[in-house]
Amino acid sequence: MTQQDRYSQGMQIRRKVLGDAHVERAEAAKTALDAPFQELITEAAWGTVWASDRISLRERSMLTLALLAATGNFDEIPMHIRATARTGASQEDVIEVFQHAAIYAGVPRANRALKLAKETYAEMAAEGGDPA
């Protein structure tokens, strides 16, 4: 697979998981400064890791949320909570993910992640989206 193929596949998966509106906003905000970084994550994260069919998007979504909580990378949790509407990870799945993170990575990190999830699900419900 060429670099361009991986980028194209990455954009397709990125849109499938995050939604067209999110990707369009991100692309519109892209500048010369962060364009190389955006290309890197589109090819590597979305075109390689997320594009693999070895595990489902639901499982990958759950893993991503667990890793974000465990490493304290809270800024991306709302984006990935929103993505669960497209990946098939339910609210119950997310609760299990953060309970698992609490035991293996620490209660404060899991507590913060769960707070962000609750806020994001409430926003999604207020926007008329399915928070489940």
Image (spheres, grey):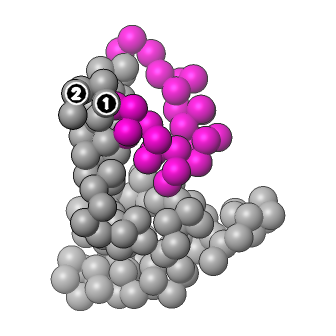
User: Where residue 49 appears, x then y in whole percent?
Assistant: 26, 52
Mark carried by residue 120: none
Going by the image, does 100 lie left or right of 9?
left
Query: Where residue 28 appears, x then y in whole percent?
Result: 57, 23
Which quarter of the rendered picture does the C terminus lie within?
bottom right
Say few, some or many: other residues with alpha carbon within 10 Å of mark 2 (under 14 / 14 to 19 / 20 or more).
few
User: In this rendering, does residue 81 appear at all?
Assistant: no
Residue type (three-letter) at the residue carrying disc 1: Asp
The answer to whether the residue labelled 2 contacts the one labelled 1, judged by CB atoms less than 8 Å apart, is: yes
Start and end of the magenta stretch? Answer: 7-33
Please state the horizontal and vertical placement of residue 6, each as a whole percent of the image: 29, 34
Q: Neighbour class for label 1 at 10 Å: few (<14), some, many (≥20)?
A: few
State the residue position of label 1.
5
The kind of secondary structure the magenta stretch mainly shows is helix
Residue at the spot of label 2: 2
- State the image quarter where residue 37 is shown: top left
Q: Total marks drawn?
A: 2
Reply above or below: 26 against 57.
above
